[in-house]
Amino acid sequence: MKGGYGSDGLFHCVAGELRYDDFDKAGKIGPWKVSKILEGVRMARVKEHFSSLKQDQGPVIMFVRSHWFKIYPSFHTRLDEDVSLKFSSFTSHIGRTSFCVDANVCSLITGELMATVSTHSVMVSVETRRPTPIPPELVQVQQVIPPKEKRPVSGPEFPPRPSTCFTQKRTVLPSDTDANNHLNQAVFIRFCFDCAGMAAIEGKLPSFVDDIIYSNTKSVWVLYVHEAEVGEELALSCWEDSASKQTIWVEIYQESQVVGQCQMQFYEDELNNSTSESKEVLAVSKL
């Protein structure tokens, strides 16, 4: 994916035209698909910055700590095949060992804002697997554009896992991993939505009558705690918030070690957007 900086100080990338296989069975784009595109945007920005540096930065990698997606109604109603999306990203915070990059997802034609994403990443030493200071040379080439809200985004207080919640097992496959052979962030999000979808289908989420992909996502918060590698078996637990019916929690873990956590929130008036009529229309459209 190619991109470049504009006069506004933002790094702009165009994600071509959406294709048939970008959409799920509900005719929507999943947050995990957006996460995968953003991965390409991040790599384009990294290449842009590192190509301008004269020194080798040593054996360091960037570990994504968290994602915060805010999704607007137009994301669910205006996207279709042949629509192109523009991703405009900028550095919103730089600390000693970590930094935040925000991205605005807009329609290339109308400029309408459809989603925003804030990614918190940590610079990690390959040798020690511990956070390491961001190289000064890299800090110097960054223009920080602070948003109204504080960065990093303070995530929700994750509740204790209920003893009676829906639980399933999944094994990490080679196709689920990134270049570091760890569970890819986009796949992590897909795992969470798959788990919630099965929980809804089996009647474990009272406010959802069917697969959650028929409901419109409002926000997604993901915290990545530990790495998961090929062949490892993961447990996923999912439950609906006791006080907020539009909120779902998912936790991925191995025995007592938490791998990651996710909070999904949905537009309340679309919780049960899985009527037989809408399904029939989708089925006919795919014939």
Image (cartoon, grey):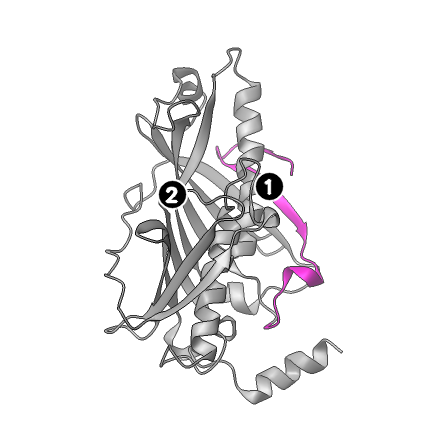
Of circles 2 and 1, the one toward us is 2
Q: Residue at 40% of width from left, 71% of height from top?
A: 267
**Who is closer to the viewer here, 192 or 71?**
192
Residue 51 horizontal/vertical position (percent):
58, 20
Tell me the number on the disc at residue 52.
Answer: none
Pointer 1 residue: 13
| Other residues around mark 1 within 10 Å, as few (<14) / some (14–19) / many (≥20) | many
Pointer 2 residue: 226
Residue 36 horizontal/vertical position (percent):
56, 48
Amino acid bearing label 1: Cys
Is the residue under label 1 in contact with that under label 2 (CB below 8 Å)?
Answer: no
In the displayed structure image, the side of residue 65 where residue 172 appears, left or right: right
Up-down: is 236 above or below 122? below
Up-down: is 240 above or below 135? below
Q: Residue at 28% of width from left, 70% of height from top?
A: 241
* Element assignment for label 2: loop
